[in-house]
Image (tube, helix red, strand yellow):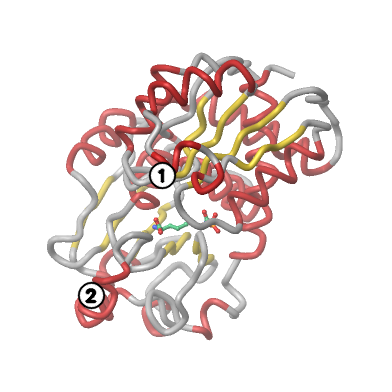
Amino acid sequence: MKNLKGRDFLSVADLNGQEIKGLLQLATELKTGNMWPLASNKVLGLLFDKASTRTRVSFSVAMYQLGGQVIDLNPNVTQVGRGESIEDTARVLDRYLDVLAIRTFSHQDLQIFADYARIPIINALTDWEHPCQILADLLTIQECFGFLEGLTVTYLGDGNNVAHSLLLGAAMMGMNIRVATPNGYEPDREIVKTAQKLASIGVKIIITEDPVAAVKFAQVIYTDVWASMGQEDESLERIPLFIPYQVGSELLNHADSEAIVLHCLPAHRGEEISSAVLEGARSRVWDQAENRLHAQKALLVSLLGV
Ligand code: CP
Ligand code: NVA
């Protein structure tokens, strides 16, 4: 495993393919209990502007299992919530913490944190990307199929932060990636271009409005909420546009017979995924949620260099 000591993790594209493979290998070893690195006396800060169950708890448990400590820097209990600048906050937190995970709206703000703090800054979700999620997703897919290269993953729904990170991660790992969204909800063109640039040879990247064509013979079917945090007021108006992209039993019939279904959670049953599929035999969502812990523990070990 190439050591990532001192690096930031703001985007999947901050790593190269070898580094992602290394992290997945390390996560597998940590999961099986083959190694037990220690981050005693290391402190992780969690600065979350948005709600979180999985990311918050899995980062905290990972740090505790490594023998480290966690501080919750909720904006309501710090000066962040009263408008202290990011530049000042970053330089101060840098003097106390060993690593800082941030969940916020603007990716630009996250970048400013990274520019002003010398410690590793981790993207725990912005409106642009959710790279920690994708490490866990790749680990889950690798566990199910034994490999990643050559598989086809289809993402259905909104071309959001999760879709962006999945596009990058899948392309970099040699997976074909198809993204099916309603017109006007495609992933950003800049991300698609980056994914094309970073893709291994032979990788096919397809952005389409056709959910059935996108799902045909795919091995991994992935979805996320149609309205992300901060877009709740658009939820109702989006439903009729997005309904053809719901991951339901009928759509799944077009997928590979061994296809698995992933969802980063939280899920809205009856919207982006049917209850039958979420609870069904193809669903791997609970393993996927568990893998947040193992993948992020590997990330912490690597960024801290312990
Ligand atoms: N998937 C995910 O990031 O979940 P949380 O919002 O609960 O952290
Ligand atoms: N796209 C979702 C992911 C939640 C984990 C959001 O940003 O709300």
Q: Position of residue 218 (x, y in %)?
A: 41, 61
172 on left or right of 183: right
Q: Position of residue 277 (x, y in %)?
A: 51, 79
Residue 44, above or below 161: above
- The circle on residue 238 is 2
277 on left or right of 44: left
Q: Position of residue 32 (x, y in %)?
A: 82, 43
Label located before the other in sequence (2 or 1): 1
Q: Residues within 10 Å of mark 2 (few under 14, many from 20)?
A: some
Q: Residues within 10 Å of mark 1 (few under 14, many from 20)?
A: many
In depth, the one of 275 and 6 nearer the eye is 6
User: Looking at the image, which residue sits at the far left?
Assistant: 183
Mark 2: which amino acid?
Arg
Residue at 54% across, 67% down: 258
Residue at 74% across, 24% down: 42
- Res 35 → quadrant: top right
Residue 201, above or below 28: above
Residue tagged 1? 104
Q: Secondary structure at mark 1?
A: loop
- Res 85 → quadrant: top left
Q: Position of residue 70 (x, y in %)?
A: 70, 37
Mark 1: which amino acid?
Thr
Residue 42, above or below 240: above
Q: Secondary structure at mark 2?
A: helix
Q: Which of the image's four quarters has the C terminus?
A: top right
Whether the residue carrying mark 1 lies under 8 Å from ligand 2 is answered with no
**Disc 2 from disc 1: Cα separation:** 23 Å
Quadrant of the image where one finds ligand 2: bottom left
69 on left or right of 265: right
In depth, the one of 144 and 289 nearer the eye is 289
- The circle on residue 34 is none
